[in-house]
Image: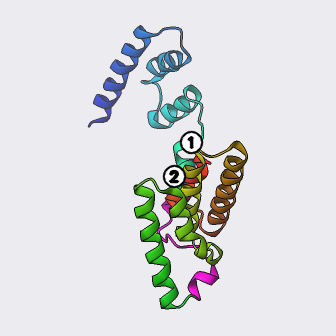
Amino acid sequence: MLPFKRLLTINVITGQFIHLKPLSKFSSVLAELKLNLIKWKHPSKQILRLSRQAVKPQTPLLLLWTVPFLSSDTAVKEGSEVKKMSNQQKKEMNDAIVESDELFESNKYQEATSALLPFKDINDVEVLWRISRAQYKASQSSSVSDAEKRQMIQEAYDSITKAMELNDSHWAVHKWMSVL
């Protein structure tokens, strides 16, 4: 686009905005832009300066929430105990995870927790967040007393906190941390 056409387009746009809301700070900045557009030697620099006056810069909250998930390596902070496990132990743990997921989907939360408890001390993120999830769901049952409910939620919170320390870039850890 030619510079003259660009200036003409900006001039038309600013004129339209000024007629819509004459009292706002944004429209006053646009009015200044319209009046001085022809005089400036480098209008792009002036437009940038005026836009900074019109719009107060703020830290985007969405960016703050997405930064931890941008890591390309999903297992950045795995516990050293998980790395030292034998293949047999890893297979048993993976089988327990699959079993726990099946039990969880069929609303058997206590059994899902029991399937993973032998692997709680291994410090694996996958095990810890699933334990937290199952304990929380089990605590929501109407047959659980208030004292048991508090204890189960506290244990679930402790597990998810431990998982967060091990790997803070795992999506499920963040989800269940926010639930708890």
Q: Is residue 68 in sight in this rendering? A: no
Give the distance between the C-alpha atoms of the residues marked 2 and 1, in whole angstroms. Answer: 9 Å
Quadrant location of the N terminus? top left
Secondary element type, mark 2: helix
Q: Read off the magenta span.
A: 68-84
Quarter assignment of residue 53: top right
Q: Position of residue 95 (x, y in %)?
A: 44, 76
Residue 61 to residue 47: above or below: below
Mark 1, other Cα within 10 Å: few <14 / some 14–19 / many ≥20: few
User: Foreground residue, 163 or 167?
Assistant: 163
Quarter assignment of residue 20: top left
Residue 88 to residue 75: above or below: below
Q: Residue at x 63, y 62 (%)?
A: 164
Q: Position of residue 91 (x, y in %)?
A: 45, 83
Q: Residue at x 50, y 63 (%)?
A: 112
Which residue in the structure is indicated by mark 2?
Answer: 66
Say which mark, if any, is on residue 168.
none
First in residue order: circle 2 vs circle 1: 1
Q: Is residue 60 left or right of residue 107?
A: right
Say which mark, if any, is on residue 61.
1
Mark 2, other Cα within 10 Å: few <14 / some 14–19 / many ≥20: few
Amino acid type, residue under disc 2 in the picture: Thr
The answer to whether marks 2 and 1 mark residues whose Cβ atoms lie closer than 8 Å is no
Q: Residue at x 32, y 34 (%)?
A: 3
